[in-house]
Image (spheres, grey):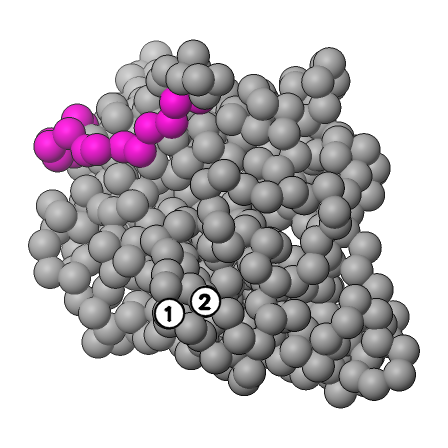
Amino acid sequence: MKTPFLITTALALTLGTAALAEAPTPRAVLETYADIAAAEYADSLSTAKALQAAVDALIADPSADTLQAAKDAWLASRNPYQQTEVFRFGNAIVDDWEGKVNAWPLDEGLIDYVDASYGDSDENDYAALNVVATPVFTLSGTEVDATDITPDLLANTLHEADGIDSNVATGYHAIEFLLWGQDLNGTGEGAGNRPYTDFIQGDGCTGDHCDRRAAYLKAAADLLVSDLEFMAAQWAAGGEARETVLADDTAGLTAMLTGMGSLSYGEQAGERMRLGLMLNDPEEEHDCFSDNTHNSHYYDGKGIQNVYLGSYTRVDGSVVSGPSLSDLVAAKDAALDAEVKAKLDTTMTALGALKDAADNGFAYDQMLQRGSIKGEELIMGGVNGLIDQAKSFERVVAALGLDGIEVEGSDSLDNPSAVFQ
């Protein structure tokens, strides 16, 4: 008759021990956060170097194969980089730098030739400048000698020229445009289709100015590598970004949650997904030339999940992990931790369904087509999951006793009527 009592007592002791398990220190959680950032930026750098090598091979021997290899390298480089975007918004050093490597959307006519349908822009006098075809031009009243296309020219003269955000001359999307060319398919099937002959220097060159196009592509690839070298160093041992995060527990945790909330809500759910669906506009795709947007969305979501769970799987298959925000929340409120993890899983399931559909022939720009019920379901599944998890992040802020965080918003979510004004 005493056996049930003994079992109950043992169970109570076990549960009591679990309840009293020591929570990780905020410092330990922040060290994991910094370790994940370091690993993700290191992977972004290594894959960018592979892209750089593929670009060099394309320029040295233009062919259908070398162009495809460069495209494949670009696609591979996006996956680790997108997982770093969760470090934006809360870390000033990342915010001040990010526009160099991932700014979008861009007026691609600034860089190279575009279709006649591209037209002029009332908001940007340089939207069709075509630097590849124009070795000398006037910018903001000053004559610019662009005879030599160099990383310095791209970064310090052309990028955001005249203070216009869409004058994107550097980073992943400038390279993407040069590899794929414009996607002229609208919401129909197909991505950009630039021919490899656009890089043949001499007889056989198409698109004219193939030597300058190759020089621009090389300068952009070299600049991407140097920019990522800078950021990887900021999160390595002794780096400024790492030291800033570890200097103050409260500020560090606030940075984590600001990044998670802002990327989830205003940036991804709003500006990258809901806005394009409202406008049915493929120009609002994040990776619009390559039709890779589904992967960018998926790995953005994965980056948020990585930070909460304190674990990142590197491109070589190894895992960087440690005491996590999840562990810290569970020690305060186990039910809240379970809620957050469930919502992260729901979001990743939705983004995974979107990714699977695109991988199997239903491209993201086709999902944006007006009247596409299936496309709207797939996109809104991701949007709703991201919004829902952002609400739980607000509860995490309260549970950890942090002051309210400022999360990026989006008119597409907060003031939809303004989108059409």
Q: Start and end of the magenta stretch?
A: 398-413
| Looking at the image, residue 168 lies above or below residue 294 | below
Q: Residue at x 55, y 83 (%)?
A: 147
Read off the residue under disc 1. Answer: 142
Give the secondary structure at mark 1: strand
Q: Nearer the viewer, residue 164 or 334?
A: 164
In magenta stretch: residue 274:
no
Going 13% across and 48% down the picture, which residue do you hit? 251
Specify whether 79 is left or right of 145.
Answer: right
Quarter that holds the N terminus: top left
418 to 10, vertically: above or below: above
Label 2 secondary element: strand
Q: Distance from label 1 to label 2 (Cα)?
A: 5 Å
User: What's the amino acid at mark 2?
Assistant: Thr
**How far from the left and from the top, in percent, is residue 29?**
25, 52
Q: How many marks?
A: 2
Task: Give 110 or 410, whichever is nearer the viewer.
Answer: 110
- Which three-letter amino acid code belongs to the residue tagged 1? Thr
**Residue 377 percent coordinates (x, y):** 65, 18
Name the disc covering residue 20, or none. Answer: none
Residue drawn at point x = 34 percent, y = 53 percent: 163
Q: Nearer the viewer, residue 234 or 57?
A: 57
Q: Which residue is mark 2?
A: 138
Q: With respect to residue 236, does 332 lie above or below?
A: above
* Image position, residue 402 (x, y; %): 12, 34
Quadrant of the image occupied by residue 162: bottom left
> Image quarter for residue 27?
bottom left
The residue located at (40%, 50%) in the rendering is 164
Task: Report the predominant secondary structure element of the magenta stretch.
Answer: loop
Residue 186 is at least partly visible in this image: yes
Q: Residues within 10 Å of mark 1 (few under 14, many from 20)?
A: few
Q: Are marks 1 and 2 in contact (CB under 8 Å)?
A: yes
